[in-house]
Amino acid sequence: MTWLRGGEENERARLEDGNTRVHPRMRTAQVGAVVAVAGLLGVVATTAGQNAEERGVDEAAQSVAAPNQPAPEQAPAPLKAQEQPKQLPASPEDGGPAKGIDVSNHNGPIDWQQVADSGQNFTFVLSTDGTDFTNPMYKEQYQGAKDAGMIAGAYHFARPDDSSAAEQANRMLEVADYQKDGQTLPPVLDLEVDPSGGGCYGMNVDQMTQWTTEFNDVVKDKTGKEPIIYANPSFWEQCMGGTDKFSDQPLWLAAYEVDQPSVPDGFPTWKFWQYTDSGSVPGISGDTDLNHFQGTLGELKKLAQG
């Protein structure tokens, strides 16, 4: 998901015209991955899969707008009156694989009951971007998902050149309103290449590692939870040097157009896999990011419970 702010759209166009590779994601549209489909055992990467993954990164970059720009006009999904929040009881379905989506202000109004009824178990919602952007629809989207009985989590799009990691972590937590209610996933640190011009925000590997460590420390100190890290293999190698310093944290991997994602050096496996940015989900107008969780619904609930 590639978020583009202000002059970033022109800069990205310049880079693309010059055949300079940009790795955005859905929020900064980069392509990587996370999750367990029934029958997925292990992670196998072939040369063909890697090539397809690289193509997916570039293709995903073409379709994403910046979170702090107005959402594109679209026919909003009909909203239903919300009932009392549903409980998350154990059921035979807890043994099956869990699946979910991630959204931002660009997804507009969402009928979360339709989303939940379609079989989606969880969602991640953009809370903040860098130092000064807050998703204006965060509370509506985040609470709407919970009211429909889904498990929800917040993600922060990191801009290490904007401000300190501590400042961005504190902003994210202030907006996200993390609760130990058994229905909330750990906060997510969304790490991607600089959407303004590619690269690693003018930082070297040691500086990026230190920035990430500081962000993690603030989140863990205030929530008791290690953040989930969102990244793709290209970013992790280029900007983080394939470090294994964060190997104990859950990895949300972005990887499109592959049967099984390649896990970047530094992680034993992935926990969530974002496998497309062009999914269709009842209750949401337009394309939607789709994700797998590597585990059962019961295991997802345990992650939300801490």
Image (cartoon, helix red, strand yellow):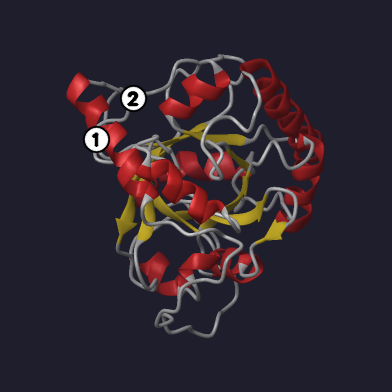
At 40% across and 35% down in the image, what residue appears? 20
Q: Position of residue 236 (x, y in %)?
A: 50, 24
In the depicted structure, whether residue 183 falls above or below residue 269: below
Quadrant containing the C terminus in the rendered view = top right
Residue under label 2, please give it.
262
Q: Quadrant of residue 159?
A: top right
225 or 22, which lies in front? 22
Residue labelled with disc 1 = 258
Q: Is disc 2 surrounded by few (<14), some (14 to 19) or many (20+) residues within 10 Å?
A: many
Q: For the residues labelled 2 and 1, say whether their Cβ atoms are less than 8 Å apart.
A: yes
- Binning the other alpha carbons within 10 Å of mark 1 as few (below 14), some (14 to 19) or many (20 upward) gives many
Q: Residue at x 45, y 17 (%)?
A: 268
| Camera-nearest residue between 93 and 22 | 22
Q: Residue 200 appears in which quarter of the rendering? A: top right
Of residues 200 and 226, the one nearer the viewer is 200
Residue 39: % across, % down:
23, 34
* Place of residue 129 in the rendered image (x, y in percent of width and height, measured from the top left): 65, 51
From mark 2 to mark 1, how far is it between C-alphas? 9 Å
Going by the numbered disc 1, the residue's amino acid type is Val
Q: Is residue 195 left or right of residue 234?
A: right
- Checking the image for residue 60, the label placed there is none
Q: Amino acid at mark 2?
A: Ser
Residue drawn at the location 57% of the way across and 60% of the way down = 67
